[in-house]
Image: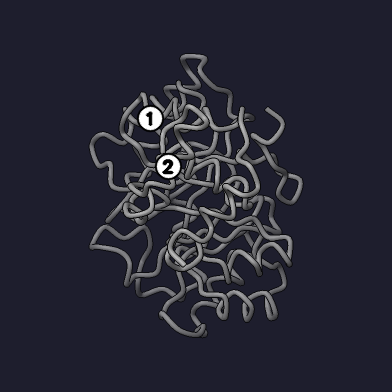
Amino acid sequence: MPDQNSHIHNVCAPRFLYGTAWKEDQTQRLTELALQQGFRGIDTASQRRHYHEAAVGQAIAASIDSGVVVREDLFLQTKFTFQAGQDHRLPYDPKEPIPTQVRQSFASSLEHLGVERIDSYLLHGPEQREGLTANDFAAWRAMEDLHASGQARVLGVSNFTREQLERLCGEARVRPHIVQNRCYADQGWDRRVREFCSAEGLVYQGFSLLTANQHALASPLLASIAKRHGRTPSQIIFRFALEIGITPLTGTTDVGHMRDDLAVFDFHLLPEEVEQIERLAA
């Protein structure tokens, strides 16, 4: 389908990603299943607290060996996480300066994933909830160097407010190409950040579209639109996300839902349906 991929800084990126957080010893099996169903974008992080990046790498290696995928068709996205977001299983020496921590974390990701470069490298979140610190800029500068070397093809940030994003874009040598945030219906589906991304040509990735919006998912409006299109409410949410410029992530552990999630590229919502869903929690 024509809108299944987009191009980010000359890198072909799927418009639907499989997220690998919180899967622990099921990470390899579920990532392999996702690849078998057709996912080609895989999101992970060098943060053992919530991700098992090495198991993602094992799934990729097994899927390449079995002929399910070739490396060139994959969009692999991982992240640098500050120590506050980690547990004791750190991918770097916390005594080292932040730029060294970034390089060590990145090297760990390359080893875990069994690749020579990362398609998309994200700063997992700013050091503090508000504003940006010297460490945020130090980490970003180290990421810019990885991008300049060709090892990180595109750069991005996650869990950023609009104000943080505006400041980083105003001061960075390389502006982020991607912003990945949790997406709440009652916050206009992160409208303020999405509007900035749209105006500035940044790709917006949304996660927790279902889990953070159970009230919207169970609404009569979603049920009515789903019935009209012969789809599930979850499919309507994901199609809606695509319609308003969100690249959705799914972390489903159900193979049937994996198939359903990817089956949202062969229909469109009516403009009035999109408006109704946008206003759902207004």
- Residue drawn at the location 35% of the way across and 37% of the way down: 252
Q: Nearer the viewer, residue 37 or 113?
A: 37
Whole-percent x, y for residue 263 in the image? 52, 27
For the residues bearing labels 2 and 1, Cβ distance under 8 angstroms: yes
What crowding class fits label 2: few (fewer than 14 Cα within 10 Å), some (14-19), or many (20 or more)?
Answer: many
**Is residue 22 shown left or right of residue 129?**
left
- Residue drawn at the location 49% of the way across and 63% of the way down: 158
In the rendered image, the vertical position of residue 234 relative to residue 167, given as above or below:
above
Q: Find numbered disc 2 in the image and state the secondary structure of the residue it sits on.
A: strand
- Residue drawn at the location 41% of the way across and 73% of the way down: 96
Q: Identify the residue under disc 1.
A: 257
Q: Which mark is residue 229?
A: none
Q: Which mark is residue 250?
A: 2
Can you tell which quarter of the image residue 72 is in?
top right
Whole-percent x, y for residue 243 in the image? 62, 46
In the rendered image, the vertical position of residue 70 relative to residue 219, given as above or below:
above
What crowding class fits label 1: few (fewer than 14 Cα within 10 Å), some (14-19), or many (20 or more)?
Answer: some
Question: In this figure, what is the number of numbered marks?
Answer: 2
Can you tell which quarter of the image residue 265 is in?
top right
Where does the N terminus fall, quadrant-wise? Answer: top right
The amino acid pointed to by label 2 is: Thr
For marks 2 and 1, give the one nearer the viewer.
Answer: 1
